[in-house]
């Protein structure tokens, strides 16, 4: 039953129903707010016909069986089917009509996806585990809007695999939310509240167990001992930052599940009562692990009057946060060279998106087109001396070197232009930042390139800390500076 978004869980017993009705009557008399029966919904949970009729005698409302929608979240007694989740998919699709894509470049679409498409399913994922089908449909919409501006995109339109796009920016992604991992991180918050706030009224309610979420939550937490009354001897990671399931797996398996969930450290160490929990076969390995645990528990000293502290591993204050839980899914993944530097660079979003494609070698150069069988010749059309790769076009080509030299010479940094030893744009970028003095990087003034009607160019992504290539608001340099830059290929990539 709903009363101004309030949910009442009642048993269909006459005494409980009468008492709840009296409480609502007292509330009405004290506040003057009345419950509107026409707006109340009654959702039976495992109730037979007789119990439902009894309920309707005391509370007049419309019967709405599960699955239902509460505060925009679909709820059901069983796993939600496609029919229910299709409403969520349609809601995401309706927020980004195709006409908006024609007004934005890919950098603008990236911002819109982060603020809209990724936020809508987050509200639902907090309470419900989205099915792989729903995640696949929503990812298809996000992927299509990014690469083509349409509802979906074929494989040839996608310049980078979607899992890599959804990685954090420092790991080479665009920072889009991975819906599966972010949903798992959100639901870890319930496990945290269950362990740290035992007074919550929903503590004893049954819930669906997710082995992946529980396993990651277990390895992400540890217990700092106080009086030992809260820490579980067999389950928690309290012994040198580890749990007995890691230290003595065979001994742990010889203990019944009931004893594992009930035995605290305080009661277990009192007279070494944990020994009586061992009920399995006493194999050689079990005996060896028993002796190991015996030795490790000899030096444990409990502090009376001090509560045990349940700690989160991935934050400095040892408190849970969804952001740290989400980042923990990417621990161990190798960062992409230059991705962290690009993330800190202050430059127009359009320029940063182009360099992001450069970092992943996803620009359609002649060498890349030849690799995919789209053309036969991969020679550079500017110098005709080497294959036309993106590193060659931006650094190695003689035309590019001349452009960089004229540009840096005009601002007084002629020594920073690429030399014969520079063969990669990212390597040269890092070398230039190291050679550039700190005073220059923090006091450099904005510089303008291009014509009055030109948009910010790719030169702005070199990434000096305060150096931004602006638009038409600054003086235009001499034509010699931009000589060779207005080639058709460069204009297309801008």
Image (cartoon, rainbow, N blue to C red):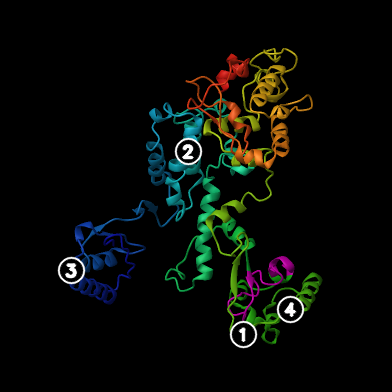
Badge 1 marks a residue whose secondary structure is loop
| Spot occupied by residue 5 in the image (x, y as percentages of width and height) | 30, 59
Magenta span has 242?
yes
User: Which of 398/352 is in front?
Assistant: 398
Tell me the distance, in whole angstroms, between the alpha carbons under discs 1 and 4. 17 Å
What's drawn in magenta, residue-wise? 223-250
CA neighbours of label 2 inside 10 A, class few (<14), some (14 to 19), many (20+): some
Q: Earlier in the sequence, mark 1 or mark 2?
A: 2
- Rounded to the nearest angstrom, the CA distance separating label 4 from label 2 is 54 Å
Which of the numbered marks, if any, corresponds to residue 32?
Answer: 3
Instruction: Give the residue drawn at x 57%, y 22%.
Output: 493
Residue 340 within the magenta-colored segment of the rendering: no
* SS for dot 4: loop
Q: Which residue is mark 4?
A: 297
Instruction: Tell me the residue that label 1 is attached to.
Output: 304
Disc 3 is placed on an element classified as loop
N-term-proximal mark, 1 vs 3? 3
Q: Which residue is mark 2?
A: 111
């Amino acid at each position: 039953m709903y009363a101004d978004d309030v949910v009442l869980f009642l048993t269909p017993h006459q005494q409980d129903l009468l008492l709840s009705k009296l409480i609502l009557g007292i509330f009405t008399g004290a506040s003057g707010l009345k419950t509107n029966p026409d707006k109340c919904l009654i959702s039976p949970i495992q109730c037979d016909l007789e119990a439902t009729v009894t309920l309707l005698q005391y509370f007049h409302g419309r019967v709405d069986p599960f699955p239902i929608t509460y505060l925009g979240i679909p709820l059901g007694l069983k796993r939600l089917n496609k029919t229910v989740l299709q409403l969520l998919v349609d809601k995401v699709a309706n927020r980004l009509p195709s006409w908006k894509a024609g007004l934005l470049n890919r950098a603008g679409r990236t911002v819109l996806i982060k603020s809209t498409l990724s936020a809508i399913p987050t509200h639902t994922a907090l309470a419900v585990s989205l099915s792989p089908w729903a995640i696949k449909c929503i990812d298809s919409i996000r992927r299509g809007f990014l690469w083509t501006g349409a509802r979906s995109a074929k494989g040839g339109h996608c310049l980078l695999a979607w899992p890599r796009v959804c990685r954090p920016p420092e790991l080479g992604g665009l920072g889009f939310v991975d819906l599966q991992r972010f949903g798992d991180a959100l639901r870890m918050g319930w496990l945290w509240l269950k362990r740290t706030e035992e007074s919550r009224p929903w503590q004893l309610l049954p819930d669906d167990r997710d082995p992946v979420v529980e396993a990651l939550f277990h390895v992400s937490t540890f217990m700092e001992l106080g009086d030992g009354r809260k820490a579980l001897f067999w389950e928690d990671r309290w012994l040198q930052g580890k749990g007995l399931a890691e230290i003595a797996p065979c001994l742990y398996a010889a203990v019944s599940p009931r004893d594992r969930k009930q035995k605290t450290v305080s009661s277990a160490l009192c007279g070494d009562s944990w020994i009586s929990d061992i009920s399995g076969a006493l194999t050689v390995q079990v005996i060896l692990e028993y002796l190991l645990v015996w030795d490790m528990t000899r030096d444990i000293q409990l502090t009376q009057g001090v509560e045990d502290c349940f700690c989160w591993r991935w934050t400095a204050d040892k408190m849970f946060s969804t952001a740290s839980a989400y980042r923990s899914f990417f621990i161990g993944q190798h960062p992409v060279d230059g991705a962290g530097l690009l993330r800190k660079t202050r430059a127009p979003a359009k320029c940063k998106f182009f360099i992001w494609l450069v970092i992943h070698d996803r620009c359609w150069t002649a060498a890349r087109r030849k690799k995919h069988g789209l053309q036969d010749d991969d020679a550079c059309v500017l110098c005709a001396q080497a294959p036309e790769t993106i590193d060659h076009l931006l650094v190695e080509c003689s035309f590019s070197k001349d452009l960089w030299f004229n540009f840096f010479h005009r601002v007084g940094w002629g020594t920073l232009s690429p030399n014969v030893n520079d063969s990669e744009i990212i390597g040269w970028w890092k070398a230039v930042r190291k050679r550039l003095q700190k005073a220059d990087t923090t006091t450099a003034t904005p510089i303008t390139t291009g014509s009055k009607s030109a948009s910010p160019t790719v030169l702005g992504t070199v990434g000096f800390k305060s150096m931004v290539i602006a638009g038409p608001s600054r003086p235009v340099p001499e034509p010699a500076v931009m000589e060779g830059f207005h080639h058709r290929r460069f204009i297309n990539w801008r």
